[in-house]
Image (cartoon, rainbow, N blue to C red):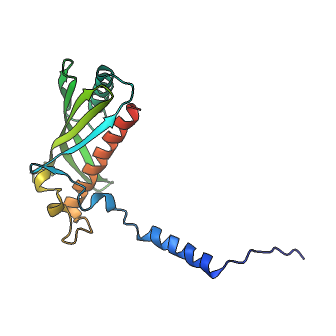
Amino acid sequence: MLMISMPMMSYAQNTWENNTVKEEVDVNPNQKYLDGAIPLVDGKVVFTKTFEAPNKTAFQIYNIIGKYFQDITKEENQINSRIVIADTTTYELGASYEEWMQFKSNIISLDRTRFYYTLKAVCQNGKVSVEMAHIRYLYDEFRKPQHLKAEEWITDKEALNKKKTKLIPITGKFRRKTIDRKDEIFKNLENLLK
């Protein structure tokens, strides 16, 4: 008869493991979308970030950012997007985007909105400041068009419950997708500048 000995687990180990599991369960998957996730600058929704680009000149950074801004205009979800500023004397770039933001798609329904925003980049030796602003939406355009500004739709006041612990279903989906898109763009920029 084959006997396998199992190590004895102490009460302390078992308690610690149960607490670890509990902590993982208690983490709110929506935390990054909650209180303070939408920054307001002079009453406008504006996401800004400065990216470090060690050992790169302003001109090199300008070329990297310019190519990425142009690449976005060619993505599948783009409708009418273009570069609007490309200044090689100040190393500034600006782009205006109109793209589909999709919430749900299945055989019965398609829930999406036109998503408008601008990206602006100011390049310097070793770094670049990027801004995502002028955010707005055109929702339900074929039945009952709604022109929505980010300031009136995805702020803490509009998209969170009173305790600021949950997203409100309709406005919350816009907030979540906007933050996800901003995160995607900023992460891509960070990777390109390494």
- Image quarter of the C terminus: top left
Q: Is residue 122 in view from this perspective?
A: yes
Tell me where residue 68 appears, x and y as whole percent. Answer: 31, 29
Residue 2: name its quadrant.
Answer: bottom right
Residue 87: name its quadrant.
Answer: top left
Of 9 and 139, which appears nearest the observer? 9
Tell me where residue 151 appears, x and y as whole percent. Answer: 12, 52
Tell me where residue 134 appears, x and y as whole percent. Answer: 14, 42
Of 125 and 142, which appears nearest the observer? 125
Residue at 40% x, 35% y is: 191
- Image quarter of the N terminus: bottom right
Tell me where residue 72 appears, x and y as whole percent. Answer: 29, 33
User: In the figure, is residue 48 to the left or right of 185?
Assistant: left
Residue at 23% x, 68% y is: 164
Q: Would you place residue 130 above or below residue 156 in this image? A: above
User: In the figure, is residue 171 to the left or right of 102?
Assistant: left
Residue at 25% x, 57% y is: 173
Q: Residue furthest bottom?
A: 11
Of 20 and 152, which appears nearest the observer? 20
Q: Is residue 74 in view from this perspective?
A: no
Q: Would you place residue 7 above or below residue 92 in this image? A: below
